[in-house]
Amino acid sequence: MRAILFSGGLSLLISLLGTRVAISVLSARGYGQEIRDDGPTTHHTKRGTPTMGGLVIILSVLLAYFLAQLITGSRPSASAMLLLFLFVGLGFVGFLDDFIKIVKQRSLGLRSKAKMVGQTVIALAFGLLATSPMLEDANGRRPASLDISFLRDLPIALPPFLVILFIWGIIAGFSNGVNLTDGLDGLATGASVMVFGAYTLVNIWQRNQACGYAPGPNCYDVRDPLDLAVVAAAITGACFGFLWWNASPAAIFMGDTGSLALGGSLAGLAVLTRTELLLVILGGLFVLETLSVMLQVGFFKLSKGRRIFRMAPLHHHFEMLGWEQVTVVIRFWIITGLFVAGGLGVFYAEWVATQ
């Protein structure tokens, strides 16, 4: 448990101080954000704000995690290393996207197909390794299950190739979902703090009720819940520290570097904790934002030019209705809090009901 406290605290401190340094360095190099011309006009004032702040989040998490392991004398687990691989890998895809935007001086970076190829390669590698028998522990548990999971494994066994496709779909969906949500100052960062904080609690509970620690009919058969909690706490702390500078008016943006990494690692946590369907509740805001884009695009094509929302993703719709950015962000944070509270309530209620 000490590793969780060290990881979260160190990550917050490194991110808080490191982001200030990053702002100065990125500003000096002219690595500023490009803004969509078809977006809300109030966003045009943000042009030139330093971006790629996700690099600070990634470095903070890595430093904090390994320092916490060193301080407590613990060894990294296979599950944690897989999650960090996913976190860094998708962050690299996002970095390429951000860097191209800066070099080309345009609001679009990697082509959509190229970005999807990068996400697919990382997601498939993660899925193959997580379900590989080579990473079984002494009790025969792999980092990821071959079953569909809600609060624990459901009796829905799938062929391995369908499991890999399912994992790919979750990772692609949530990495893009957080990316779509990252459109207002502090919105995606603040929401991520709450959802990763929830997964820290879920992992701690799974550790305390783990089959190898507290055997029983309702125990959780997760391979490395405590070490996953250390990673989740590190990401929570890093986002918290970054939010100090990313809150309105933002002095820096995380860019695709941060949003793809955060979204992918959320999906990775869901896979490794056997709670894939629970993530739909905990990360409900990201689901809503993604659905708003899908509905907008689909309706636009089917109706030959008509729109459901004034602009997608959903947060821009409320901006176009005249809501202040800060109002949208705070109310969306409240919605995230309700989703997180609901998800944790469902998670705990299931355990109580089975006692």
Image (cartoon, rainbow, N blue to C red):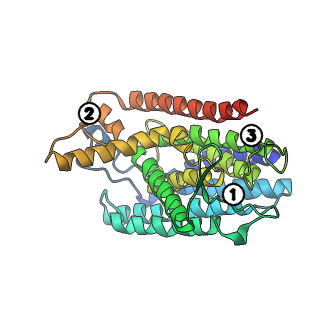
Front label number (1 vs 2) = 2
Disc 1, SS = helix
Front label number (3 vs 1) = 3
Q: Does residue 282 appear to the left or right of 98 in the view shown?
A: right
Q: Does residue 39 appear to the left or right of 324 in the view shown?
A: left
Q: Which mark is residue 205?
A: 3
Disc 3, SS = helix
Q: Identify the residue at image location x=50%, y=58%.
A: 166
Q: Quadrant of residue 314?
A: top left
Visible in this render: residue 184? no
- Measuring from the top left, give residue 35's x and y in whole percent: 31, 50
Residue type indicated by callout 1:
Leu
Tell me, yes or no, whether the two marked residues, 1 and 2, touch with CB atoms within 8 Å: no
Q: Quadrant of residue 204?
A: top right
Q: Which residue is mark 2?
A: 320
Mark 3–mark 2 Cα distance, whole angstroms, equals: 42 Å
Tell me, yes or no, whether the two marked residues, 3 and 1, touch with CB atoms within 8 Å: no
Which numbered disc, 3 or 2, marks the residue that appears first in the sequence?
3
Disc 2, SS = helix
Residue type indicated by callout 3:
Trp
Which numbered disc, 1 or 2, marks the residue that appears first in the sequence?
1
User: Above or below — where is 76 with respect to 38?
Assistant: below
Q: Identify the residue at image location x=43%, y=53%.
A: 176
Tell me, yes or no, whether the two marked residues, 3 and 2, touch with CB atoms within 8 Å: no
Q: Quadrant of the C terminus?
A: top right
Q: Which residue is mark 1?
A: 63
